[in-house]
Amino acid sequence: MIRHTPRSCVLGLCSYTHDSAAALIIDGELVGFAEEERLVGDKHTSAYPAQAVSWLLAEAGIAPEQITVVGYNFQAHRYLGTLAQTPGQLLRSTTRGRAIPRARSFIRVARRTRARLADLSARFPRARLTAVQHHRAHGLYAFASSAYEDAAVLVADSLGEVQTTTIGHARAPLSGGCEYRITEAIDDPASLGYAYGAVTEHLGWRRGDEEGTVMALAALGDPARFRKLFAAAIPLTDTGFALNSELLPLRVLSSQYARIASAFTGATCPPRRPDEPLEQVHRDLAAALQERTEQVMLHLAQRARRLTGSGLLCLGGGVAANCVAVGKIVEAGIFDEVHVPPAPGDSGTAIGAAIALHLAGSGTLPAGVTDRCYLGPAYPDLDPPAELRPGLSAHRPAEPARTLARHLADGRIVGLFQGRLEAGPRALGNRSILASPLLPGVVERLNATVKFREPFRPFAPIVLADAAADYFTLPQPAPFMSIASGVTQLTRDKIRAVVHVNDTARVQTLTPEQNPFLAQVLTEFATLTGLPVVINTSLNVKGKPICGTPEMALDCLAGSGLDALLMEGWWITK
């Protein structure tokens, strides 16, 4: 049912690569954003985001033919920029063997990208299709979500088309308009995301998925053991960093080419299989990788400050999901404040692509992006008793926030499914698993029987913003759980469960305006326990995406150690 006839309908897409997603801007306002994996259950899916697009169109009350502009998050021709590197790579012995396969692989991906654009044109024949530079999409979303008027923008990922790291300067004065300009770029093969992914895979985890596991493991290791190796593998330069191809070989866009050189393996350890036990060498390797990542990100942040003169920083790209590195930047005091959007990885470029095209057409940023993370589907008219699995029962408590807080205080682990689906990799209170940090053995129980993941993985706290300074040393808000913070002695003494081995916590600060129901739960929990802090982790199990639909949430309850699920006001138990 078409409810109105909009003047401008801009659809932004991330598709065919990984983390497919869609965003829709109608007449200058962001209608919504959804990641396809959370609607179909296939983590990091590369498929065209059909479910996300269908939901957006239904949410806006428009038909597909009313889409006026479609933005895609890669530009095909930019992949060919690597060809200028080929002659020099042929002259060097360490890159000669891969130079031609590398060039061919980038040509192949350029052709594939053109084919993907043709597919999108066929899906939306009445719309104007525009490809957006990948790092521009990252950077515009990072800035537009920040509420800053002037900021440095640092984007770091594995690979855009050719760029892997960019520093930009964005301005959006209150008088109107917006200007975002990339002032400096680092091209592949120098890629921090490539290096982190390569070592993640070497350590036995999935590249492009489980880098966060390696970040957590790093706290258990000694970086000194491989410090010199990583200084050689990822040397700093005046304008950023480089990769040493003798240790981290030249990238070829094909799974047939290893990302770790034999010299690196010889200096560290053989590749670990996922089913092999962890040894100290693996912990130390993770620690050295993480330390070098933090050093490089600090170096880049310092350069961004010098180049732009801005006192505020926006971070984007997959490397911006490294909350420990972000915490180091905040701790260093290089900037007055640091902002990471809720979806800093590639899914967020769907929003960025839509923003770029809206900006190009109007000269302004769209409304509805700033400080928003709850952007996906909601199910307010849910009637779980008609949909329950065998063995589940449901009732509707009169005071759901108080009921949830009481059960948490009594030691139960509860899933929470309410309101609009979050954007990005962190559950922020609408698709979450909550637990009391006062519960003995809660981390062990969550990892072993609820999440089914490694025992060293930490869990993040959520705290009422007006009480955050009592428990955490972070000097700024952290509404999207994107910054690792130091902790106070009170936290060490009372709620050790939220403190990782490195004496940090990936905290989420919350105000009643951001999430009224969750703030009420925290207030009720504080009344019962004296503590305005609970554990908040994503409503899923290892290897599955965050539960975006009621069916996925019920499956999670039935198939895990959750004690209960509060879903749109219904208390559901096994």
Image (spheres, grey):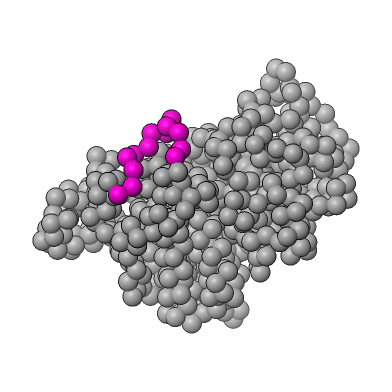
What is the magenta segment's predominant secondary structure? loop
Q: Position of residue 69 (x, y in %)?
A: 44, 56
Instruction: Determine if the magenta segment contains residue 269.
Output: yes
Instruction: Determine if the magenta segment contains residue 336.
Output: no
Residue at horizontal 67 percent and vertical 49 percent from the top: 498
Q: Position of residue 36 (x, y in %)?
A: 51, 41
State left or right for residue 210 relative to residue 114: right
Examine the rendered structure and indicate whether residue 75 appears above or below residue 551.
below
Q: Quadrant of the N terminus?
A: top right
Residue at horizontal 24 percent and vertical 49 percent from the top: 263
Examine the rendered structure and indicate whether residue 16 appears above or below residue 11.
above
Nearer the observer, 239 or 368? 239
Residue at horizontal 88 percent and vertical 46 percent from the top: 528
State left or right for residue 422 relative to residue 20: right
Q: Position of residue 120 (x, y in %)?
A: 38, 46
> Picture quarter containing residue 574?
top right
Report the span colored magenta: 267-279
Examine the rendered structure and indicate whether residue 205 appears above or below residue 517.
above
User: Can see residue 474?
Assistant: yes
Q: Position of residue 402 (x, y in %)?
A: 86, 43
Nearer the observer, 62 or 371? 371
User: Can see residue 177?
Assistant: no
Residue at horizontal 82 percent and vertical 29 percent from the top: 395
